[in-house]
């Protein structure tokens, strides 16, 4: 091939983009359906099974892993698959290590212990799904934060604001998780501390620790979650908001059935205000 032919070939358009984004989009939709169906199972199954049996909690596990898959496939249509896997793996690893330390040494969340009936346990301390909770918490809250901050996405400090708002949303989401997981389902138990102020057993330091751990995780995974490919279209991504809202609805309905209305009210306010800011930001 002579130089002229080589130059001409270089000017030819490249091959059409592969269909991986379409595949991941379809998988995201499929798992969003699974998320909604599993949410229904979470609400209906206690009426069918013994609420205190291990089999009564399989819908929660299905709900957790279907959310993880939906969030992961949603990210994979925007970012390289290896980046998504690495960010989820790092979040799982850091979350798992922190949970093991927290269970063993009561730091940084405060004294708590997991229900020993839920096997298998990592090192006999932490259930396997526990670190997955961190993956769901970080990825869903970050997606909602992106919608909230969409009007300011071109501001120089946008990245720092995204990390901060994500950590704040993680704290607010944990306010809903705690009564659901401890008061209703007894997945873990809080022990008494010297400071009597708690939120359904969870000490205030727990929520500060959740925010701090979220900041640490985000410091590691944020470079992996930056889309370096320029795109003419910048459309809002509503999938994380859908997933996060479904989670909050499940928490609210379950807590309402348990009669813990203070948690329901707080959860409702958090959901409405957050979704309102996210929808407002999506219009920009």
Image (cartoon, rainbow, N blue to C red):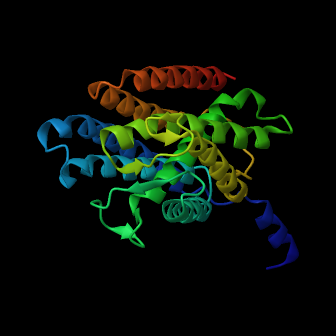
Q: How many numbered dots are placed on residues in this image?
A: 0
The correct choice, above or below, for 102 with respect to 146 in the image is below
* Image quarter (top left, top right, bottom left or bottom right) of the N terminus: bottom right
On the rendered structure, is 187 left or right of 5?
left
> Which residue is nearer to you in this view: 265 or 18?
265
The correct choice, above or below, for 30 with respect to 249 in the image is below
Query: What is the residue that sits farthest to the bottom in this orientation?
Result: 1
On the rendered structure, is 3 left or right of 194?
right
Locate residue 148, reporting x and y percent.
Answer: 65, 29
Question: Residue at point 41% right, 33% down?
Answer: 246
Locate residue 254, reporting x and y percent.
Answer: 31, 31
* Image quarter (top left, top right, bottom left or bottom right) of the C terminus: top right
Locate residue 86, reporting x and y percent.
Answer: 60, 64
The correct choice, above or below, for 211 with respect to 88 in the image is above
> Which residue is nearer to you in this view: 110 or 122?
110
Question: Residue at point 63% right, 31% down?
Answer: 147
Locate residue 42, reporting x and y percent.
Answer: 27, 40
Q: Is residue 1 visible?
A: yes
Q: Is residue 23 visible?
A: no
> Which residue is nearer to you in this view: 55 or 210?
210
> Which residue is nearer to you in this view: 240 or 237?
240
Question: Residue at point 52% right, 56% down?
Answer: 20
On the rendered structure, is 164 left or right of 190?
right
């Amino acid at each position: 091939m002579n130089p002229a032919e080589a130059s001409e070939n270089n000017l030819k358009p490249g091959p059409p983009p592969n269909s991986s984004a379409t595949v991941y989009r379809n998988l995201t939709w499929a798992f969003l359906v699974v998320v909604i169906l599993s949410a229904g199972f979470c609400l209906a199954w206690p009426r069918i099974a013994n609420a205190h049996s291990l089999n009564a909690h399989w819908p929660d596990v299905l709900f957790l892993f279907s959310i993880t898959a939906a969030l992961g496939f949603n990210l994979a249509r925007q970012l390289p698959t290896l980046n998504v896997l690495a960010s989820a793996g790092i979040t799982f690893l850091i979350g798992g290590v922190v949970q093991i330390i927290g269970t063993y040494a009561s730091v940084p969340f405060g004294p708590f212990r997991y229900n020993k009936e839920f096997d298998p346990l990592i090192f006999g301390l932490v259930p396997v799904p526990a670190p997955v909770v961190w993956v769901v918490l970080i990825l869903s809250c970050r997606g909602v934060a992106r919608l909230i901050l969409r009007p300011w996405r071109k501001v120089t400090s946008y990245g720092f604001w995204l990390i901060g708002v994500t950590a704040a949303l993680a704290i607010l989401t944990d306010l809903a998780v705690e009564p659901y997981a401890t008061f209703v389902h007894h997945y873990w138990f809080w022990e008494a501390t010297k400071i009597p102020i708690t939120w359904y057993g969870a000490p205030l330091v727990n929520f500060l620790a959740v925010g701090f751990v979220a900041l640490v995780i985000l410091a590691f995974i944020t470079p992996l979650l930056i889309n370096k490919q320029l795109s003419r279209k910048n459309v809002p991504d509503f999938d994380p908001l859908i997933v996060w809202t479904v989670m909050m609805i499940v928490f609210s309905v379950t807590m309402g059935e348990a009669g813990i209305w203070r948690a329901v009210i707080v959860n409702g306010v958090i959901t409405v205000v957050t979704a309102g800011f996210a929808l407002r930001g999506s219009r920009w």
